[in-house]
Image: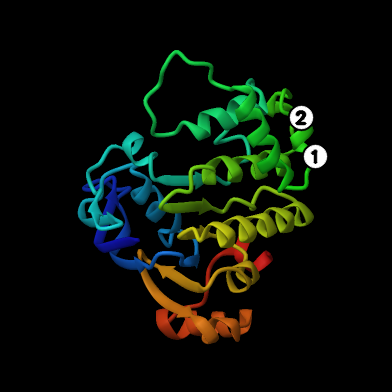
Amino acid sequence: MLKITNLYKTFNPGTPNENRVLNGLNLELKEGDFVTVIGGNGAGKSTTLNAIAGAFRPDYGKIEIDGRDITNMPDYKRAEFLGRVFQDPRMGTAPDMEIAENLSIAARRGKRRSLLWGCTRRDRELYREVLAQLDLGLENRLSDKVGLLSGGQRQALTLLMATLKKPKLLLLDEHTAALDPKTAAKVLELTDKIVNENHLTTLMITHNMRDAINHGNRLIMLHEGRIIVDVSGEEKKKLTVENLLAMFAEASGSHFSSDRAMLS
């Protein structure tokens, strides 16, 4: 479903601030894979997701989704088959619009716009059904402005919006990092439920090593813009944080250097 081949990206080339972030990255995801991504500071985690989403063009390499080369495709065209949830709960939703209106926008992603009503009675009935699955009471608040929701409610809504059209690839960019531990656990529980029930191919960046181990069927670790650890199946199930740190040290020849990850 996703194939990244020999991807390179350097920011500010030829200047004192030159920074090579992706260094020949290669990655393949099969349909239905749920891959967690972890790495130290500046390892290239978010840059990888931004490259897939089309936030910039790589210097070299190829990105394919479902066999289709999207390397030079504009980001707005990728929105038809990509879903994304950001770290900041305020991103991905329109705060001054109703919950129902936000869901209507998500439901029409990739479709041609028309002069028909954006949110019909039938739509509202559907939205109540899908919101009820979140178990947050939002099904009774369709007319509430999204800006009135808590961070956890808003992130859960963003997750629902990103997956409403069942994207070919779901990108989760540290989507629980800004939430308190209890709320983060709830959003991760919802993530597992939505991803598994819809068999979504998913790439999830996290700074929390335990979350990286406990979620998904595969774990990769980035270092200096390339993958140095890649575990799946039974090997992943037996992983501990200590094992993961040891694997990183052996593969990179250095100690893991992410304060956020270590603190979490």
Please name the residue that numbered disc 1 is placed on: 137
Residue 257 appears in the rendering: yes
Identify the element where label 2 is drawn.
Answer: loop
Q: Quadrant of residue 81?
A: top left
Decide if residue 82 is on the left or right side of residue 105: left
Colour treatment of the image: rainbow
Decide if residue 224 is on the left or right side of residue 12: right
Dot 1 amino acid type: Gly
Q: Quadrant of residue 144?
A: top right
Residue at 24 percent across and 53 percent down: it is 68
State the residue in front, 14 or 240. 240
- Quarter of the image where the N terminus is located: bottom left
Residue at 33 percent across and 43 percent down: it is 54
Residue 39 appears in the rendering: no
User: Exactly how many numbered labels are in the figure?
Assistant: 2
State the residue in front, 168 or 16. 168
Local packing at callout 2 (Cα closer than 10 Å; few below 14, some 14-19, many 20+) is some
- Quarter of the image where the C terminus is located: bottom right
Dot 2 amino acid type: Arg
Where residue 96 appears, as percent x and y from the top left, is 64, 20
Where residue 186 appears, as percent x and y from the top left, is 73, 55
Where residue 112 appears, as percent x and y from the top left, is 37, 25
Where residue 52 appears, as percent x and y from the top left, is 35, 51
Q: Which mark is residue 231?
A: none
Please name the residue that numbered disc 2 is placed on: 141
| Distance Cα–Cα, label 2 vs label 1 | 7 Å
Above or below residue 118? Residue 3 is: below
State the residue in front, 129 or 12. 129
